[in-house]
Image (cartoon, helix red, strand yellow):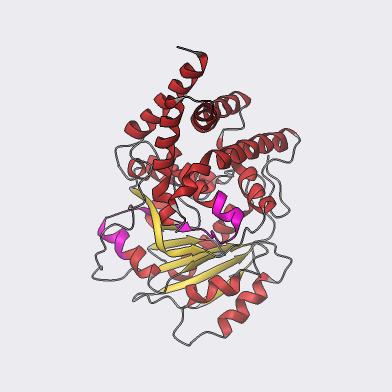
Amino acid sequence: MSALTWTASGSLAAWLWLLLAQARFWRTDIRLPPRSEPQAWPAVAVVVPARDEADVLPLSLPGLLAQDYPGRAEIFLVDDGSTDGTGEVARRLASQQAPHDLPLTVTSPGEPGPGWTGKLWALRHGMALAQERTGAGFLLLTDADIAHAPDSLRDLVSAATGARLDLLSQMARLRADSAWERLIVPAFVYFFAQLYPFGRVNRPASRTAAAAGGCVLLRTEAAVRADIPESIRHAVIDDVTLARAVKRSGGRIWLGLADGVRSVRPYERLPQLWRMVARSAYAQLGNSPLVLLGAVAALTLVYLVPPLTALAGSPVGAAAWAVMALTYVPMLRYYRQPPWCALALPVTAALYLLMTLDSALRHHRGRGAAWKGRTYA
């Protein structure tokens, strides 16, 4: 066989392995487990870390305040050193809500302590205050840009209690309105599911663990048992690290796609999306140059070789491209995009490869995981 055919065959073999051995990562029908309303609804503390989120809070916070939850629930918004009036906006929105809406406490923890990332420092402060005030059985950790449907909290708690879960996380439906969002966002979730197949995450016997930080319902007992957040205080990719800590401590976890939980943060231009990916891509690889080389080789073989060899006339390359596209179609449907966009996945993968290389370059220049004025080693 020619070198072209050998290369294309290697790519096709990789795709057949992904198709058969990676826990059907392309599935998008993994939604909340069957819900069972508890006899007594547990108290829930909703902790929202927020840093410079004044623009998105009017789109997200009213829905959280208006949750239709039968038990006791309270929201703690932790203003993490904002300079845009985030705390004031939150208080104003709460004052405009109906009398029966959830109570809101706005608090500020000051600058992060040594060895802490800003978000986890904020969560530590919010979780401690919540336990002092409410003694909640569950903690809902949700980002400031996440909008919840009115029955979101009820559904999360009834699913977690019905399935006896210690951690339940939903991957929020991200915005996919602009051209750049449509090109990059569905692939972001697709790549995440390929790395952490939801079906494997949800098997208690599997060592694979992951969560989506925008929406995590955590049993308080499990947080204490896993020493959350102290045991993960250094984590840049805090959601996956959180899930690993809970699972390692014997907790049952679940991860799936959301219907009533969505992100309202716009990423209308490429630089915004680039920063979102580049801030943590190299950390995902353990900040290892050797792992980076392996990742670049794997991305090239799996995503770039199929179209290049197919366009050079290789039917084997065309077959690999077809398998790739077919596994991407379900995610495009979830994001209400036309199926033919699956053919452009290699272009998106090439962008992600460049973002990953840029992430490594930033790290070695001492800029690490930079986000909203903070840089982590």
Where in the figure is residue 336, as x and y percent of width and height?
44, 59
State which quarter of the image contains the N terminus: top left
**Position in image of residue 16 (x %, y %):** 36, 29
Q: Where is residue 9, by image quadrant?
A: top left
**Residue farthest to the right, as pictured:** 365
| x then y, percent, for residue 239 | 50, 49
> Which residue is drawn at the image coordinates 57% and 60% (left, top)?
125
Give the extent of the magenta segment: 158-183
In which quadrant will I find the C terminus?
A: top right
Can residue 211 be seen here? yes
The residue at the far bottom in this view is 99
Whether residue 166 is in magenta: the answer is: yes
Name the residue rendered at 61%, 78% in the picture.
Answer: 91
- Above or below, 95 against 291 in this view is below
Q: Position of residue 105 (x, y in %)?
A: 56, 74
Q: Residue furthest front?
A: 313
Front-most of 267 and 151? 267
Q: Within the magenta stretch, is there residue 310?
A: no
Above or below, comparing residue 273 to residue 6 in the picture: below
Residue 129 appearing in the image? no
Give me the residue at 47% from left, 88% from top.
99
Between 148 and 191, the residue placed more toward the observer is 191
* Side of 377 relative to 24 (left or right): right
